[in-house]
Amino acid sequence: MTNMPRLISMATAVPRYRLDQPDVASGAARLFGDRVRDFERLRPVYENAEIETRYSCVPIDWYLTEPGFEERNRLYLENAVPLLAAAAKDCIARAGLEVADIGGIVTVSSTGIATPSLDALLMQRLPFGPDTERLPIFGLGCAGGVLGLARAAALARANPDRIYLLLVVELCGLTFRAGDRSKSNVIATALFGDGAAAALVTCRDGFEGPAITATAEHTWPDTLDIMGWNVRDDGLEVQFSRDIPTLVRRDMAGILADFLRRHELAPGDIDTFVPHPGGAKVLDALEEICGLPPGGLVEARAVLRQYGNMSAATVLFVLERSLGDRRRRRLLSSLGPGFSAAFLLLEELA
């Protein structure tokens, strides 16, 4: 295969504060115990989430306050750029390159607003060239890791002499609203964490790494209410449906089979499944449709357990962990607002 984009380096980064799930559960009980009517019925979600630790850009006491949107977004900008800088420098160094070697930046984030965009802010911190291409992407949510890598691959294919840096950062904790008494908000406190990831993609000769051989996405009709944000005066209100695992079990097998069939493959031809671990129940459903035993998505479950759901960044944490073994063919997948599924094939080529 000619002109095939390759993944030549990866790195991840998390903020300084570690949140242990028992401490989060205790804090949620103090906050919601007398304010959410069904909280005691919901309380087992903290254990059932199968998450032990997460990372946050703010200490746990911050979550008991009620800041406005302006304060939240200030914290987003103050923390997102340093996290991206750390991941970017590590990723570039692992490839034996300099920052000035990067020809373009694709930046994915949906948990805050930045204009100038995060990539422009990062260019004031690191010595990127003034002709560096920039593609900031907002609104992909949890699908952003796979789709961001797909967009970087498309750019690399169109500009084979350039090296593209994918950057993903999600500070999900900053969207938590203490005054929101909805079930979705309670569940969000049991799931979401903060993190960033970086990846380098290029078609330039002389670099080694697995090739991005195919990408696809599928958007269901009439599903805009499945996942997303509602903008409120005090921040972003999380919206997600309890029907996501049901939707995965009902439709994903056929959608996945169609994607693989177009490339003369079947699920049995995939050596490693690399899904976005949105939650334990979603992983249960994915194991069923991928023909894996319960607990078979080992790397995805380990990332969920150690980092929680970091939205778009999470699947890249799973991918980085899986790259320790030179498996021939990996399938990345994620689900996000739209409601959409994203797929990407990563293959070791001779």
Image (cartoon, rainbow, N blue to C red):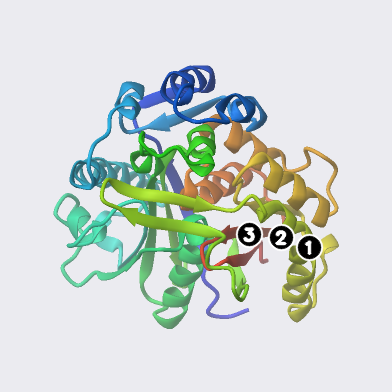
Q: Secondary structure at mark 1?
A: helix
Find the distance from the CA under tag 3 to the CA under tag 1: 16 Å
Find the distance from the CA under tag 1 to the CA under tag 2: 5 Å
Instruction: Measuring from the top left, give residue 66's x and y in whole percent.
Output: 27, 33
Instruction: Measuring from the top left, give residue 338's x and y in whole percent.
Output: 53, 68
Find the distance from the CA under tag 3 to the CA under tag 2: 15 Å
Which residue position holds label 1? 250
The quadrant of the image that shows the N terminus is: bottom right
- Specify the amino acid type for callout 2: Leu
Task: Tell me if mark 1 has few (under 14), some (14-19) or many (20+) residues whose alpha carbon lies within 10 angstroms of its own.
Answer: few
Q: Earlier in the sequence, mark 3 or mark 1?
A: 1
Which residue position holds label 3? 333
Q: Are marks 1 and 2 in contact (CB under 8 Å)?
A: yes
Q: Secondary structure at mark 3?
A: strand
- Specify the amino acid type for callout 3: Ser
Q: Nearer the viewer, mark 3 or mark 2?
A: 2
